[in-house]
Image (cartoon, grey):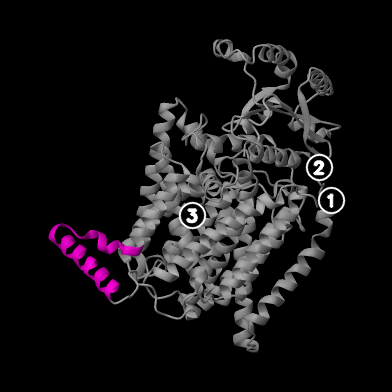
Amino acid sequence: MNIPYTDTIFLGIIRMLLWILFLYVLKRLFFKGKPSQNQVKTMGNLWAFYGSIVLVVIYLLVQFNSYDLLTVMALMFVFLVMRLVGFENLRFKGESWVRKRRTILLNVIENVEDKDPIIDVRKSEASKRFSVKTGFHVATAASIVAVAARFYLMQYDNYQLSTAWFQELNILKALEDQEWFGSNLVLTGQYAFMSFYGLITGISTEMALESFALFQVFILCFVIFWFIDAMTNSLVTIPLLGTLAFALFFNLAPTNMAQITHSKSTFMAMSFLLPAIIFIRKPWKLYKERPNGYFFGMVCIFAAIALIDLYTLLILLPPFFLVSLPFTRKRYIKYYFKALGAYVLSSSLVLLSYAYSAYEKDIDYGLFIRSNLLSVSASTTTVNMALDYDSTVFAFQVLSLVAVIVMFFLYRNNSRKWVSPMVFIIYVNALVLWGKTGFIYFDNDLLNEISPILLACSLSFVFYIAYYFLNSKVIRVEISDAVSAPLIFILFFALAYFTQQPLLQRTQKRGTLSKNILEAYEKVKDSYIPYGYAVVNANNLIPMSRGSHHFISYDDFVENYPERDSVYFQYKEDKDFLVRNTEYILPNSLLIFIYENVSSEFAAKVRVSKETNKNVLIEIDRLRKKGREVRLFYKKDNLRVYEIVNNPGEAKIDELL
């Protein structure tokens, strides 16, 4: 396995996790409140609530042309200060606020005189403040396993530099230019997260696009673990089974192995849909001690889904509301309708904003809705499956029917324990049956795309039934999590390895040229100051130059650059001439990409003829003979990048320093 930019890929993920760790340490050190007894539940809630708020804030910032790293950091700082002071303390007005301010000042003075901390730091022992439960360790380990598995599969991936890759890169570049709605009104929610991920970790846009799918899977695995935990109240065993089924098995549901590391809007939306399902079924998990915050939280979650994926919003969510209603207890029926109201409100606001943008850009709004419900970018195949597609669906439905019947009888004795898993399995089967009706806006490819998630969760509930009967009806076996979790990991590793060998053997490994190009661009951007250089490359690689450097096509280099070079060096010292004739000014350095003996697969992505390569090499040789400094900047396999130095010491960062 040869992934050239491994360090950059994991650099972004590690930095993001360090940010999360930093915020966790701040919370444990300074924020009041009872420490969480289950960090998995806490992190799941935090992702659903604060993740959705981050997306909505990014959406609003882009509308006001204010989205950049400085603004994001400033807002984070303001939020942390407000959270530290306490949101309830911000509500004072008039004389009450003056009294509160005086009280705070007096407390600060007293603390200084008594040599006590000004900030009310937790007095509990460090071991209690930072203690982490076993479930959190296991969930994190399962998420890391999922990332590692998909990183290994990158050698089979042909997503880099594909048409879809460039389309998504253009969306990210548009976000950097404060443009949320492109000319085609593509849903941008997932790319807003991707852009935020790149900003907060300091990696390039291209590397954010390349590595975000791994971070997306990390989040999704954590959410799946939390979802199964919340549904079954099993802290480790059952959630781990479901999470590893999604993380390691690629032959259970339709999956395109050639784009396994392609980030998916449906996956991003599912990381909010699963929490929404929990909060509809078990509203107290969201509002806790503050019931009034339930509606606002659900508005944010549904708004995030609406900004990410219309298929999830308009096709996947309504059936769950219908299935869930008959099983909602009277005590929580008001929260069900609050959730429904939040869904209607969020959907209406976001869809109205889309309608306004469509009107401004003179785009058919109905066509926009239909095109986002019937995605052309979703690609799933059934050749990876252990069983054929129809047999798998039939087996799943039979297993689901048996599980629902068993749960129904268990539900009569203990409704609270079994109602939520039963509702979810009914819901998944309702989606499968709806897909068979031939409804024009039900895209089965999109359903297949999320089927690994739905299947993993549903099978975990089937395991839960078997586990329940084994422990309550047959023999009660007490095995500690410290023993059971490693055993489950070993078992799933072995099963995944031995059952999927044929799948990997018939999956074609891809060449590394596309990855080498990305690595070369990354080295160029790290080595040169922005717009201090130009890149000579194929026309379809123009998006990679946007926002960082000048671009010269091969044809322009061969036909026009020789004249520019001659005129520039003839009048290089004549500043007045160059000011009057700026078209002759050359970049300080010129980076020329040369491809040798490329495969037909790569030639379909980057269209460079042998004749073009030959002419470019001839021109490089002419420039060398004219006295221009030509040096080899990058060489790997069949890719070479030459640098032509026009102004020594004025483009490369290390030379400037």
Q: CA distance from mark 1 to mark 3?
A: 38 Å
- Residue 183, magenta (yes or no): no
**Nearer mark to the viewer, of 2 and 3:** 2
Query: Could you tell me which residue is drawn at 62 percent across and 17 percent down?
Result: 585
Q: Position of residue 596 (x, y in %)?
A: 84, 31
Above or below: residue 297 compared with residue 107: above
In screen coordinates, is 28 left or right of 138? left
Q: CA distance from mark 1 to mark 2?
A: 16 Å
Residue matched to label 2: 511
Res. 319 mark? 3
Above or below: residue 570 compared with residue 113: above
Query: Could you tell me which residue is drawn at 46 percent across and 62 percent down?
Result: 46
Prevailing secondary structure class for the magenta stretch in the rendered image: helix
Q: Position of residue 339 (x, y in %)?
A: 38, 58
**Quadrant occupied by the C terminus:** top right
Residue matched to label 1: 506
Residue 615 location, quadrant: top right
**Which amino acid, by three-letter code, is at mark 2?**
Gly
Q: Earlier in the sequence, mark 2 or mark 3?
A: 3
- Residue 95, magenta (yes or no): yes
Above or below: residue 40 compared with residue 65: below
In-front residue for pair 321/232: 232
Magenta range: 84-113
